[in-house]
Amino acid sequence: MKLYRLLTGQDDAAFCHRVTTALNKGWSLNGSPSLTFNTQTGQVMCAQAIVKEVEGKDYHPDMKLSEQ
């Protein structure tokens, strides 16, 4: 099965660590990151799509994608 996640958050070290953790768990980047500026908080927000191929399992909407 092929899995998809969209990681989002403030563009900071914590976000980079979340992406790095996912990469080290077998996820791959899917496309370029997106950035936007939140005028209310003054923060740059980031989004990065990631995908992962998992053999021998069937997808179910109740599964926790981050645990795959």
Image (tube, helix red, strand yellow):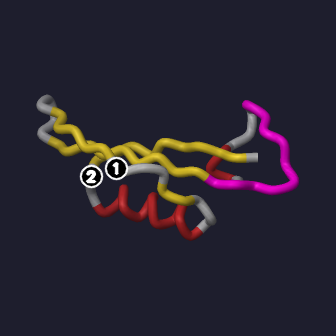
Tell me the number on the disc at residue 33. 1
What kind of secondary structure does the magenta stretch mostly adopt?
A: loop
Residue at far bottom of view = 24
Query: In the image, residue 32 lies at what x, y percent?
Result: 36, 51
Which residue is label 2 attached to? 11
Bounds of the magenta span? 52-61
The residue mark sitting in front, 1 or 2, is 1
Badge 2 element: loop
Query: In the image, residue 68 lies at what x, y percent?
Result: 71, 53
Pick the front one: 64 or 59: 59
Is residue 45 shown in magenta?
no
Of pointers 1 and 2, the one earlier in the residue sequence: 2
Amino acid carrying mark 2 in the image: Asp
Residue at far front of view = 31
Q: In this view, does 55 lie above or below 24?
A: above
Q: How crowded is mark 1: few (under 14 residues within 10 Å), some or many (20 or more)?
A: some
Question: Residues under labels 1 and 2: Cα distance?
Answer: 10 Å
Taking the spot 30% from the left edge, 44% from the top edge, the residue there is 34
Taking the spot 53% from the left edge, 65% from the top edge, the residue there is 23
Badge 1 element: loop
